[in-house]
Structure formats: structure tokens, C-alpha cells
Image (cartoon, rainbow, N blue to C red):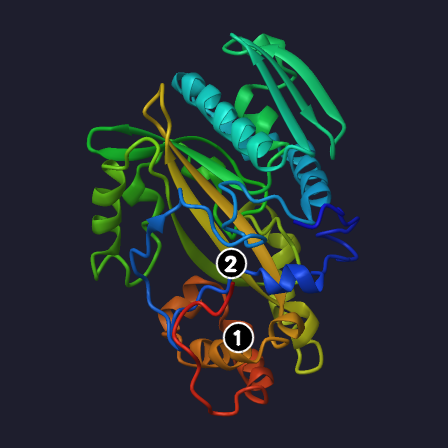
Amino acid sequence: MNTFFKDETFRNDFTFQNSPEAIARFPFPFWEDKYMYSVNMEPHAKAGAPGSVYEFPIDIDEHYVSDMRDRALVLAEDPLRCQALPHMMSAQWDMLELLMTSMAEAYPKLFTLNRRGDEWHWTNRPLRIEDKFHFGDATTLPYEPMEYITRQCQGDFAVLDQRENNLWMDAGIATSQADWSLDFDIGMNFMEWHGPVPLAHEIGVFDRALKFLLNLQQGKPVRRLNWTMTINPRLDTSPENYDKWGIDRGTVTPENVGDKVHLRVELQALWRLPRSNAMLFSIRAYLLKMRELVTNPDWARRFHRVLKFLPPELADCKGLTRYRDVTVDWLAKYDDGKPTPMGFLFK
């Protein structure tokens, strides 16, 4: 991992951009030259290739410090982006333990966790945080456990309670979400919060996914990739702020596609938590502008085809309709008609 943290913004002047190393490790999500919903789960426990987003269970990258600064701005503007129902306190502590131990084991130069029984000592060097606290006593932390650790960990998180043969979104933090609202979904079950997704219900994707997840075992996390697109490198594309970013979809022109239009990929992972039996659902977003994407000829060729032939219902659901055609036209010059190799096309 590049331990140099960039000073950049995800709003206003949008100075975010990827280094060549970050482009090379981008989790390009398309296995073939077309796309349809599927239950594309795989084990998340095995270590991935060194330097890849799969190398460690929790990925920390060059955008970490700026990402955490943007999260703090969102929470200051809208504290309801972080909510937990009262019965989820045990799951919050489970979550804190999982994230702290994962980060400290993967990045010992950046994070340190010392434990003597329930007396814990946490050090976060990039954010200059050092706290001693009593595990299980929320009064010894400046925030509740979930908010405390997720102010220091990239990605959004939902904590799902399992009961009545279903999963319930009873806690979470979402400051970089793709047009869904934690405040709206809190307390909903798995089928309810996936209700608006077209086509997937008809082909049984959510029935199979729920059945699979209800049997998820501790120590055997799973992951999948999801994707959408966004205009400008904006992390916070929430319904609460639609008035700020929705109008951006009408600003795409043939001249600015390369810099304005971004592929947004979510690395989603799920862990069974040990004490609460709840499930942690992490949603880590990676952004790649079109000008960066086409530096890889295989990505450019494949994404042109995926986007061109995407079913209209999926394009509408993902909010791409207003700028899809102009983006397809811009990508066309990078598609020479040659076949692309099978597979995800990233290391």
C-alpha cells in the first residue's frame, strides 16, 4: 500500500484523483462484456494479491485521510447518517473489535491495538488519535462504539440483526452512499430495503441471497462487487442531498465525459459477528473517472460494451439514463472490436 495520504476533496472543487498505483488496483467489476444482477458471492477470508484491494479484510488506501475528513463533514451536517437501535449495542462492540483488530493486524505502522483484558489502547497515527477505553463501556469513548471506529474506517456500514428468518437493518453509518438512505431504511428487513431494485426480484436473486446470508458462519466472511456511476468524484450521493448532486447528471457533455463521469464500484463484504450473532455489511466505494479507466485498453473496451447494452430498467435504477448515451459515444473510440479476456481484468 502507498502510505502517502493525499490531501483532496470530494465536493466543491473536486480535487480527487487516483494515482497510477490506485488505478492499477481498481476493482473493475465486469467478468464479461455484459451485466445482469446475480448472487456473485465469494469467500472474503483468503488473502488477495499483495497491493490489491483484497490483500486485507479492510482496505486502507491513499484516499484515507481525505475520506475520513469528508465523513466528519457529513456527520456534522446530518447526524442521522449514523444510527443504531438500542438493542444493537452488543453488535456495535463486535464491530469495533473486528475493525480495530483487522486494521491493526494489516497495517501495524498505521494502527496499534493493545489489550489487557477489557482495558484497550487504540492508536491511529494517520488521524492522530490515541484513546484508552474499557471494552463494553461506551462512556469511556467519545462516541458510541460504531460511530467511534467508523469515523476512522473507509466505507459505509450496515449492521443487520437476524430474527424471524430475516435480516433487519437496525444500525449503520452511511456518508458515502449511492442514493440510498439509512434514515429511511433503518428498521427495514432485507426484502423491504431491496424493494425498489428492478428485475432482480423476478429472477429470484434476493430470495437466494437471503437464504445464503442467513446461514453465514462466523469466521467465514463473504464479499461481492456492485457498481453504479456518478458525476464528479462525490462520495456523498445520498437522497438527503439530492438537490446538490442530482443536477450534475444534466451537465455531462462530449467534452467533459472523461473527467466528470465516474465508475463507482462497491466492494461489499459480510461478516457474522461473534457475541451478538448480527451481521456486519461493509460497503467500500472506489471511484474511477473515465479518463483513468481508458488507460487500461481491456477495461475501456469491455465497459463500452457493458454500458451500451445495459437493460434500460437497470440504467434507470442506477440513475444513468441522462448521460449514458454521451458516455457510450465517448467510450466508442476506445473499442476496437477485439475480444476481451474472460475474468475481472484486474490483479
What residue did someone put label 1 on?
A: 299
Coordinates of residue 107 in the picture (x, y in percent)? 62, 37
- Please state which amino acid type lies under the numbered disc 1: Trp
Q: Nearer the viewer, residue 44 or 150?
A: 44
Coordinates of residue 114 in the picture (x, y in percent)? 61, 17
Q: Which circle, 2 or 1, is nearer the viewer?
A: 1
Q: Are marks 2 and 1 in contact (CB under 8 Å)?
A: no
| The furthest residue to the bottom | 337
* Residue 187 falls in image quadrant: top left
Check disc 1 and report its element: helix, strand or loop.
helix
In the shown orientation, is residue 67 left or right of residue 346? Answer: right
**Residue 346 visible in this rendered orientation of the protein:** yes
Which residue occupies 65% across, 59% down?
A: 22
Which residue occupies 79% across, 57% down?
A: 13
Vertically, is 87 above or below 6?
above
**Which mark sits nearer the N-terminus, 2 or 1?**
2
Coordinates of residue 96 in the picture (x, y in percent)? 52, 24
Vertically, is 238 above or below 313?
above
Which residue occupies 59% across, 89% down?
A: 333
Q: Assess disc 1: are there few (<14), some (14-19) or many (≥20) residues with their C-alpha within 10 Å of its C-alpha.
A: many
Q: Nearer the viewer, residue 326 or 2?
A: 2
Coordinates of residue 65 in the picture (x, y in percent)? 72, 41
Q: Nearer the viewer, residue 244 or 323?
A: 323
Vertically, is 290 above or below 50?
below
**Residue 231 visible in this rendered orientation of the protein:** no
Q: Assess disc 2: are there few (<14), some (14-19) or many (≥20) residues with their C-alpha within 10 Å of its C-alpha.
A: many
Q: Which mark is residue 265?
A: 2
Check disc 2 and report its element: helix, strand or loop.
strand
Q: Mark 2 and mark 1: span between their CA atoms?
A: 13 Å
Vertically, is 34 above or below 107?
below
Q: Nearer the viewer, residue 218 or 278?
A: 218
Q: Which mark is residue 131?
A: none
